[in-house]
Each structure stands twice: as C-alpha cells, then as structure tokens.
Image: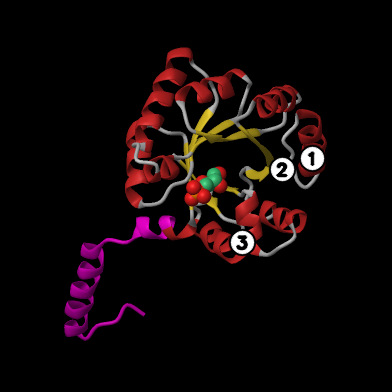
Amino acid sequence: MKFFADTAEIDAIKELAETGLLDGVTTNPSLIAKSGRDFMEVTKEICGLTDGPVSAEVVALDHPTMMKEAEVLRKIADNVCIKVPLTMEGLKTCKALSGEGTMVNVTLCFSATQALLAAKAGATFVSPFVGRHDDNGTDGMDLIRDIRLIYDNYAFETEILVASVRHVTHVLESARIGADVMTAPPKVIHALVRHVLTDKGIDGFMKDWGSTGQSIL
Ligand code: E4P
C-alpha cells in the first residue's frame, strides 16, 4: 500500500521523505489555507520533495473553469495530479483530463456508486473519506470494502486512495482490505511507528548493554 502525506506543511513532508515512506502528497483548499502559503508556490515546493503524485485541487465548480484551472496547475510540475470534486462537472473534467494523459484524483467520494462513476470517468485515484463517514455515524471502512469489491469485479485500474484517515486502525483496515493508497496527516504516519513494547524492549536492551561495559565504536 502506498503512503501519501495529507498536508501542505513543507517540514513535515521533508521529514517523511527522508524515511523513504513517502509515495506522494495530497492537499486540499483547507490544507493550503492552514499552511498560510501561496498555493502555486507551496505546490511547486512540494512537487520537488517527492517523485510521487502531488494532488492539487481545482476550486471552480463548473467544467470549463475547472479545465482552465487544471491547465494552470498541471504546468507546476510533471507530478501534479489534478484533484476534482465528485460532481457531474468534476467527472466531466476527469474524463477530459485523463483522456489527455493527466493524472486525476476524484475527491469527496462518500458512496461506492460515486466511486463507480469516478472509475468510469477514467480517474487515476478515487478518494473515499473514511473519517468524515465515521464522524457521521457510519463505518467508513465499509465503503472501502464495497469499492474494492466493485473495482475488482470489473478490473478497474482506478486506485483506491483512502482519505480522511484519522488513526492507525484506519491504516490497518485499509491494508487488510487491499486499498491501493492511504493519505494521512503526518502525525498518523508517525503513530504507525510507535509501540509500547518496542520502547520497553529498547529500554531493556540499553540497560543490559550498559551493564556489559562494552561499546561498538
Ligand atoms: C483527502 O485528500 C483530503 O485532503 C483529506 O483526507 C480530508 O481529510 P479530513 O476529513 O480530515 O479533512
């Protein structure tokens, strides 16, 4: 499963890139606002930190203007992936852009039938939002199971990009189901590393090693 960082914070992206765990980045208008940076400038900088896809979202709601915005965004770098909302206008834009060989991430997906439409429109990625489903009292992971089943039934190549990931269990379940990608805030990716028994084990080994009086270097 590929790991994307769901952030526009440069330092956090750099840190993850150094671990070799980073396969791409997703941004959205809220994350750009949170960064306080200029959209074009920060997106260009992010594109230089990973060879993987960097999702940059259009903000127009109609197809012709989405196409114009996409034209500007895809000039930023070769690894820009145009993010469009799961609306009829967004799907039209997805169809047109993917037909031209541009990567497209169809976002704000909340149902398996919406995901079916995204695949039919030629999306590179579909982004089902699991955390927001959970917030709403429904199990977001059921949506991922349904999309996996449907995409496998028809051998769709659209990758399932699990979004709105809030905790380690979302990542575990995504991997169990066979999602292609998950995008998570850096703090969730860092939380994947930690285990209390790992810390306890290191403490024990350090104590015993100290008692030997030896050193490797
Ligand atoms: C996906 O690409 C979105 O940027 C993101 O995962 C949304 O997450 P949120 O529901 O935590 O805002």
Q: Secondary structure at mark 2?
A: loop
Quarter of the image for residue 208 reads bottom left
> Which residue appears farthest toward the front when viewing the image?
136
Q: Do the numbered discs 2 and 1 sit on residues whose CB atoms are within 8 Å?
A: yes
Quarter of the image for residue 86 reads top right
Q: Which residues, given as a range, are shown in magenta?
A: 188-217
For label 3, the residue is 34
All told, the count of numbered labels is 3
Graded by Cα atoms within 10 Å as few (under 14), some (14 to 19) or many (20 or more), the crowding at tag 2 reads some
Q: Give how far across and how far down residue 104 sits, in percent.
A: 65, 33
For label 1, the residue is 69
Q: Earlier in the sequence, mark 3 or mark 2?
A: 3
User: Mark 2 near ligand 1 (CB under 8 Å)?
Assistant: no
**Location of residue 192 with respect to 106 vertically, above or below:** below
Q: Secondary structure at mark 1?
A: helix
Identified at 18% across, 82% down, the residue is: 212
**Residue 117: assigned label:** none
Q: Earlier in the sequence, mark 3 or mark 1?
A: 3
Quarter of the image for residue 96 reads top right
The C terminus, quarter of image: bottom left
